[in-house]
Amino acid sequence: MIQPLGKLIAIGGAEDKGTDLEKGEIHRNNLNFFELGILKRVVEEIGGIEKRIEVITTASTIPYEVGENYLNAFGKIGCTNVGLLHIRNREDAFREDYLKRIAQCDGVMMSGGNQMRLSTTFGGTNFLHIIKQRYQQEAFIVAGTSAGAMAMSNTMIYEGNAAKAHLKGEVKITTGLGFMSNVIFDSHFEKRGRFSRLAQAVATNPSCIGIGLGEDTGMIITQGNKMQAIGSGLVMIVDGHELRHCNIADIPEGNPISVENLKVHFCENGNGYLVNERKFIVEVNEGALVNKQVEVE
């Protein structure tokens, strides 16, 4: 299989877009955003503040508000070469001016919202084809937060009540944008208690690695395989390759599932994981781990 030359940056959502010191807003547990922040890392991976970033707001129901928030957030770290693509339907996805912008930018950022809007709007379009081709053949960055991250994989969770996710049939899966075929992303993982729904998704698709992304936390994925955790929170890896028992094929819908030998790894900033080898890495690169300041009450 040919390794992509680009990188994916999957973010769990609610990324801290910068502490507003003028208003005295201090976000606990976000560990000095301007040094460790997700958006700053996205800009660094794209190549610096001069590079062109296109923000795709398709997943959101309030695209103009979301777009302005991203312009302000990127502006705080000196990145002003940012465009907004308010693509609302499949007809928009075929516009020549949008295709030209995607062909010329250095990276894209897909906002949060509803991942089904992304898959139904872009599936099979030239717009998606250009992004995927550039990701495969160039040092092109595809970043996404929340729904934008969940849509990156071929197998995509689009619905699932966390309180009922231990019951068969409560987790709904469809086809995503297909940048990776062997993973399943979930977002807002800790805050919304989504372990059970990712576990069910992996149990029904044990060839895939589940990636549960906490808020203000993400994974940088290189060569479609090597992952590095970034940000202030937790990434949970769920591996079902060695499942010994799973009753999900034999029980009626609405019944509790039973799974044996589901492996789980916890990754913090600097930890990594090799998807193909199913191997946890303590430090992705020498010096990747950082000293953290922890508030003590």
Image: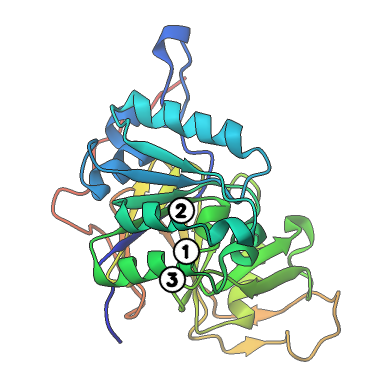
Q: Badge 1, how many Cα within 10 Å: few under 14, some, many 20+?
A: many
Q: Residue at x 31, y 66 (%)?
A: 134
Residue type beneath disc 2? Tyr
- 177 with respect to 42 (left or right): right
User: Which residue in the protein does label 2 denote?
Assistant: 98
Where 250 sits versus 156, above or below?
below
> Measured from the top left, where is residue 218 in percent x and y?
41, 51
Q: Is there a contact, CB below 8 Å, between mark 1 and mark 2?
A: yes
Residue at image location 78% in from the left, 91% down from the top: 250
The answer to whether one can see residue 32 in this image is no
The local crowd at label 2, few if under 14, some if 14 to 19, many if 20 or more residues have their Cα within 10 Å, is some
Q: Residue tagged by mark 3?
A: 129
SS at mark 1 in the image: helix
Percent x, y of residue 30 = 42, 32
SS under mark 3: helix
Residue drawn at point x = 67 percent, y = 72 percent: 173
Which residue is painted at 82% across and 86% down in the image?
Answer: 251
Q: Are marks 3 and 1 in contact (CB under 8 Å)?
A: yes
Q: Which residue is mark 1?
A: 127
In this orientation, which residue lies closer to the viewer: 235 or 55? 55
Q: Position of residue 184 (x, y in %)?
A: 53, 69
| Of the two numbered discs 1 and 2 in the rendering, the one whose residue sits closer to the viewer | 2
Gap between marks 3 and 2 measured at Cα: 13 Å
Mark 2 lies on a secondary structure that is helix
What type is the residue that disc 3 sits on?
A: His
